[in-house]
Image (cartoon, rainbow, N blue to C red):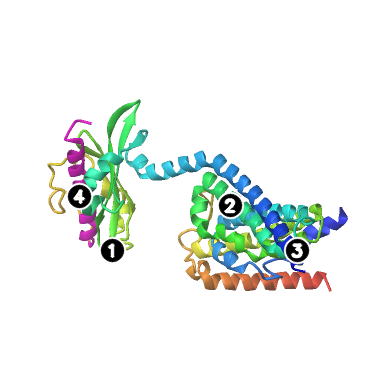
Amino acid sequence: MSGGMQKDMVRFGIALTVFCAIAAGALAFTYQATLPQILAQAKVEEEKASRIVMPGAEFVRRDDLIEKAAAQFPEFMGQGAGKIFEGKKDGKVVGAVIQLANRGYGGPIRVAVAIQDGKVTGVTIIDHKETPGLGSKVKDEPTFVKQFIGKTASDPLEPKKDVEAITGATKSTRGVSGAVKAALAIYTSVFGGATR
Amino acid sequence: MNGSLSVLKNGIARENALLRLMIGLCSALAVSVRVENGLFMGVAATFVLVMSNIIISAIRRVTPDNIRIPIFLVVISSFVTIVDLVLKANFPAVYERLGVWIPLIVVNCIILGRAEAFAYKRGIVASAMDGIGMGIGYTWVLMVMGLVRELLGTGKIVLFDQVVINLGPRFLPPVFLVTFPGAFLMFGLLIMVLNMFTNKVGS
């Protein structure tokens, strides 16, 4: 009786091992076949905001600079919120896109800022948790982010000075303008004010 | 061939997995907020269903009875992982939306149920037909539920990033349709419609 059971155990073990080995082979093959595509999709997703603010450029992620910026500006770049991309056109560096977060009214506002030669050339809101209909206008009204184009590190970037605030959403406005100001400071810091 | 055709038709209405056997409901109710979700979820589940039915039928003579369930699960989860990887590589937006429901196809009762009740006992062709029929039955229910819930719940139908139907700003959508109560309501209505229809035709 026990001999029969032992034989069964061996038989089951062999059957399961064979099936699992075949399955593992099939999965390894699929994984290898889909991996390049999956990596490409992840890159596209990561660069989506950068493409909006700096269309037509190729992006190189500068992880070496992110560390430095996160140490200097932890409230904007800390906890993985910050990303720095170098934008290249025809192989030449034309500018940088800085992704960062700043406190808004309902939570962090994530912003991507494109900077060329020390000037803001594009701003987009990646995501936010602002009040729908009030603070959410920072994203829903495209004219709001347009006002930041051309700003430099020497601009005050304050509501009532050079930023037109959204009525009833001063904190949301400050969240975005503060993020743009920080992006300019980070740009100056990590690129050393060099012209790019 | 006549026999396998009736096997195929079986899953579409008479033994519809969702409306008649009432298995695999969780994911069906959760996913059917949009037509597009229903389509992709249905195709994904159908692929897994057909492929696992074929393989399980093919290996049924070398599968020891005592450990058939672990072996079914190895087969099913392999195909689910394949679907998962392929969707992630080619349809990242859909993959994002369907989220955890794709890996959860592994534990969808329909798949294991058909493996145990059908594929383990029948030939490869019949098992493939059963998978196709059950898959179509699953997909059409998801898509009809998705169609009604999306159209009336959001006021428009979006397919592949294109607005296909728009009821316009004057239509105020009852949002509860895209929440869980809406799913149950739609599900009950579909059962009613199917019963009315088949009772007239059948027994």
Helix, strand, or loop for circle 1? loop
Contact (CB < 8 A) between labels 4 and 3?
A: no
Q: Is residue B87 above or below residue B131?
A: above
Q: Residue at x 35, y 44 (%)?
A: A49
Helix, strand, or loop for circle 3? helix
Task: Give the quarter of the figure containing the C terminus of chain B.
Answer: bottom right
Could you tell me the amino acid type at mark 3?
Answer: Asp
Q: Which residue is mark 1?
A: A106
Q: CA distance from mark 4 to mark 3?
A: 63 Å
Q: Position of residue A93 (x, y in %)?
A: 29, 29
Q: Which residue is mark 2?
A: B81
Q: Which residue is mark 4?
A: A73
Q: Position of residue A108 (x, y in %)?
A: 28, 58
Which of the 4 image quadrants contains residue B186? bottom right
Could you tell me the amino acid type at mark 1?
Answer: Gly
Contact (CB < 8 A) between labels 4 and 2?
A: no
Same-subunit check for callouts 4 and 3 = no
Q: CA distance from mark 4 to mark 1?
A: 21 Å
Question: Is residue A71 shown left or right of residue A54?
Answer: left
Q: CA distance from mark 4 to mark 2?
A: 41 Å
Could you tell me the amino acid type at mark 2?
Answer: Thr
Q: Given the image, what chain letter belongs to the residue carrying mark 1? A: A
Highlighted magenta segment, given as a residue range: A168-196
Q: Given the image, what chain letter belongs to the residue carrying mark 3? A: B
Counting other residues with Cα less than 10 Å from the Cα at mark 1, is it few (<14), some (14-19), or many (20 or more)?
some
Q: Is residue B189 above or below residue A37?
A: below
